[in-house]
Image (cartoon, rainbow, N blue to C red):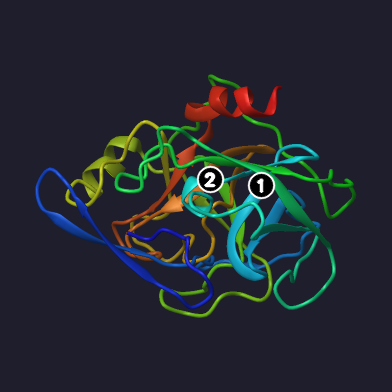
Amino acid sequence: MKLIVFTLIVSVTLTVITGKSLKPLTYPEGRIVGGKNVTIEEVPYQVALKVGGSPWCGGTIISDIFILTAAHCSKGVSERSLSVHAGSTFPHTYENGNVHRVKRIYVHEKYSSSTLDFDVAILELETPLQFSNTIKSLSLPGKDEFLEENETVLISGWGTLEEGGQLATVLQAVEIPVVNQNVCQQLYSNFLDVTPRMLCAGYIEGGKDHCNGDSGGPVVSNGKVHGIVSWANGCARPNFPGVNTRVTAVREWIRSKIGF
């Protein structure tokens, strides 16, 4: 399983007990596979999360003080070590953009590192973001706005360009289709359960996907954040589309933390 929770070069292996057998789950960093270079002006809601100044995960701006990301990017990480880099196409190689400290981390109380269910967290910043053409927020979808099969979503981040590769230095993005939930459940039936809190997207034949380091980043459709990059079996492998947290399924939890 691909969890994008790694540091720049560290990979962790976790054994998870499923109903059938023991499954080795690898947690890499993620980068977009099969995408293209983009600028932050094209995805101004995208931010880079860093731990101790090193690349860690991605996130989505949902207000001037709140960042939406994955629980596996946040659980066990201290506010003091975590920072948010906004407004930059090259946050890991240049000093442009703005770096903000994190005041508080909210991790979903039902998040499980073994099942990856409820993989959602919110970061509250110490100081508000100043919106501009490189820093903008995204709206949450309505409670009934569920994406349909084959609808297109845009994913972005600085994860690896291929499985086992190096992190991207330039922001990447790729458009991929939503995968039928039942089909995705069948494809992962011997791996992990695909729950109602999960949204699958990608091509059955592989080739385009999120990868190591993209975890926590945005999955966007029609100007709203519908997903949070979460996990997969490898990167862009055939028959294993990317799995994301479904924002509509955790929307009320998000609203309860941010207050609107």
For the N terminus, the quadrant is bottom left
Q: Earlier in the sequence, mark 2 or mark 1?
A: 1
- Determine whether 228 is above or below 47 in the image: above
Residue density around tag 1, few if under 14, some if 14–19, many if 20 or more, within 10 Å: many
Q: Residue furthest left?
A: 20
Q: Which of the 4 quarters of the picture holds residue 194?
A: top left
Disc 2 residue type? Ile
Count of number-bearing discs = 2
- Determine whether 147 is above or below 15 in the image: above
For the C terminus, the quadrant is top right
| 222 sits left or right of 126 in the view | left
- Determine whether 32 is above or below 151 in the image: below
Q: Distance between the residues labelled 2 and 1?
A: 8 Å
Q: Would you say the residues marked 2 and 1 are in contact, meaning their CB atoms lie under 8 Å apart?
A: yes
Q: Name the residue under label 2.
A: 228
Given residues 58 and 50, the one toward you in this image is 50
Residue 91 percent location from the top left of the image: 73, 69
Residue 61 percent location from the top left of the image: 72, 44
Given residues 219 and 114, the one toward you in this image is 114
| 251 sits left or right of 66 in the view | left
| 52 sits left or right of 215 in the view | right
Q: Residue at x 19, y 58 (%)?
A: 23
Disc 1 residue type? Thr
Q: Mark 1 points at which residue?
A: 60
Residue 21 percent location from the top left of the image: 10, 52
Q: Is mark 2 on a helix, strand or loop?
A: strand
| 57 sits left or right of 237 in the view | right
Q: Which residue is drawn at 88% across and 46% down?
A: 131
Residue 48 percent location from the top left of the image: 67, 60
Q: Residue at x 54, y 60 (%)?
A: 214
